[in-house]
Image (cartoon, helix red, strand yellow):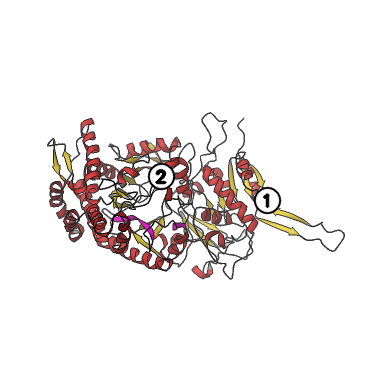
Amino acid sequence: MDAAPLIAVTSSEMRSNPLRVTPEADPPRDEMVLGLRYLQALAGVGCLPVVVPPLEGDRIDAFLDRVDGVCLSGGPDLVPAAYGAEPHPRLGPTEPDLDRFELDLARAADRRGMPVLAICRGAQLLNVVRGGTLHQHLPDIVGTAITHRQLADGAELTHDVTLTRGGTLTRALGAGTLRVNSFHHQAVDRLGDGLRVVGRAPTTWSRPSRIPASASWSPCSGTPRRSCGARSRPRCSARSLRRAAPCAGRGSPGRRSDVRLRRSDRARPPLRSRRRRVGPRMSPDWSAWQASTAWGLGVEEEVMLLEAGTGRLAKVADDVLPRLERRMGDRVCSETHRGVVELVTTPHDTVGGAVGELVATRAEVEAALEPDGLVVAAAGTHPMVTWQETDVSPGGRHQLVLSTMAGLARREPTFALHVHVAVPDPDDAIRLMGRLRWRLPLLLALSANSPFWQGRDAGMASTRTPLFGAFPRTGLPPFLADYGEWIDTVDLLVRSEAIPDPTFLWWDLRPQPRFGTLELRIMDAQIRTQDTAALVALSQALARLELTEGVDPPTGPGAEQALLENRFLAARDGVDAELIDAAAECRRPVREMLAELLDAATPHAQDLGCAPELAEVASVASEPGAARQRRLAAADGGPAAVAGALAAQFT
């Protein structure tokens, strides 16, 4: 008979009971307090719950070796220092000792990729572990129109929660809207790494992605990570999780309404990915293609934080991000290395709109960091930094990269420009990916902006390309027939626990189902936004050209080898490269091929409203970033002077 999964449950609070004055009173003692409903719910779906006492150090790992999952229970307010905040005047009672233990426990479980059910305070704690922050008093943010801290009994339901349409949580609970009780006055503010909102409470607040009744969830298919051949254990189905969560369903009498089930997409996944029915085939939930408007845009650029006086890389991202994110929300986020942040735009219809937002974000980041003696710059690499000077960021996703990439994660940081182009149909996205593969070397050559490495000229126009290529799952994407073949390719890696989710495929070009986009990732970050605008315009116009007028490129071993060679030549020589024309069986100058491409793409740019930005491609080709950096080094004293010059041009 299969053994029932053993689930660790944290206590809700610690109490010290003083000596009472009557002889019949209980003696003084310290107590752990936990509502019985947690244990009853878990036992009711076949689990063996065990309450875990506060532990320290290696004892936490030793304990987790013996259990199959963790339930983080509700309880008192979290100490604000845990997420870099000062106490609010309305902060409730806190349990600092309990906080320290549960934060350590959650981090340890997160590193292992263990199934975690996080409820109320537990969900807030998990969000903090993932690098997120909290609102300490909801009425300050959303007012009192919605009762989030009810005085009535738990059986009375006070407000609705709307779940994401078509999401797994919706299917598990059997409804798109739930009526819930509510007993909390705090909520998630900045969402932690790898978590996503799948439920919202009604509010007049202008930032619905932070709604306290939101949920972040992916069903565990049961067993924690174990080697093949380990003894089997019952799987935790979506239905059983629904029954186990004390306040997940309609009319739930418990006192915790803001249940969040942890999505482990940034940690090691379960053995089998949850699948959804699409016609006659089954597809995993992560493959659901988000609705999008054709040719819409999103831009991401990785930028470096520098000491203002020296130009040295400043490893302070995790120190300054809480403040930046309070001002800028999701427009700035962490990256693998502590000297890097990523600037992100919202979706836009036009290049001008996306780049205009990026210009404003750059200026806002500069202004926010100036009092700290920091400046910001963009290029494919920092001209001087060595691997010994790099630290990996503390977020859950980044630590997973460190644990799985070993020493590769401690290489010098690289900085890329990513452009998302919306494609409403996933099969069209795969068709476009196949056609754009042959255009990628041109985009790389034009964007090449990283000639220096470890204080010397590396002889490459884009040193970032081979540096980043040390990671697995990078480089050119495979040629695929359709979206189903892409799903099968990725799902094999996910189900076999090689990767947690598709975002751990770092190809030069990849589908992004959660945005409904094709993401171009081959380009170096640009010094100036005017150059970024030209590259974004070329990406958008080129995508439209290839999908509406293009033809399928040549395939076969010879053609594939030519494409790989072109990628190397573009990284080495930039716009001075001569690339292989597979059809003509000769090499041709990049500038000549680029001129032909611009002629074909210009009508599409005119229709898309980005013709002025596309016209600037010629200027980028005449003075590419790599050549500009080399000229700065020659004029100002070598690579050591380049970083400061890059910061001066960060506009």
| Residue 407: percent from left, percent from top | 44, 41
Residue at horizontal 28%, vertical 36%? 481
- Residue under the image location 14 percent in, 46 percent down: 593
Which residue is pictured at 45% across the width and 67% down the height? Answer: 205
User: Is any part of residue 508 visible from this angle?
Assistant: no
Report x, y in % for residue 232: 56, 32
Q: How many marks?
A: 2
- Which amino acid type corresponds to the residue marked 2 in the rendered image? Trp
Q: Nearer the viewer, residue 417 or 163?
A: 417
Q: Earlier in the sequence, mark 2 or mark 1?
A: 1
Q: Residues within 10 Å of mark 2 (few under 14, many from 20)?
A: many
Magenta residues?
Answer: 292-318
Which residue carries the number 2 mark?
Answer: 286
Residue 84 part of the magenta-drawn span: no
Number of other residues with Cα within 10 Å of mark 1, as a class: few under 14, some 14 to 19, many 20 or more: few
Quarter containing the C terminus: bottom left
Image side of residue 438 versus residue 304, left or right: left
Residue sitting farthest toward the top: 229
Q: Determine contact: label 2, label 1, CB under 8 Å.
A: no
Residue sticking out furthest to the right: 23
* Towards the viewer: 18 or 274: 18
Q: Give the SS element for disc 2.
A: helix
The secondary structure type at the circle numbered 1 is helix
Pointer 1: what residue?
36
Q: Amino acid at mark 1?
A: Leu
- Compared to 580, does 9 lie above or below? below
* Residue 50 numbered mark, or none: none
Above or below, 621 relative to 571:
below
Q: CA distance from mark 2 to mark 1?
A: 35 Å
Q: Residue 373: which quarter of the image?
A: bottom left
Residue 17: image x %, image y %? 76, 59
Left or right of 37 on screen, residue 484: left
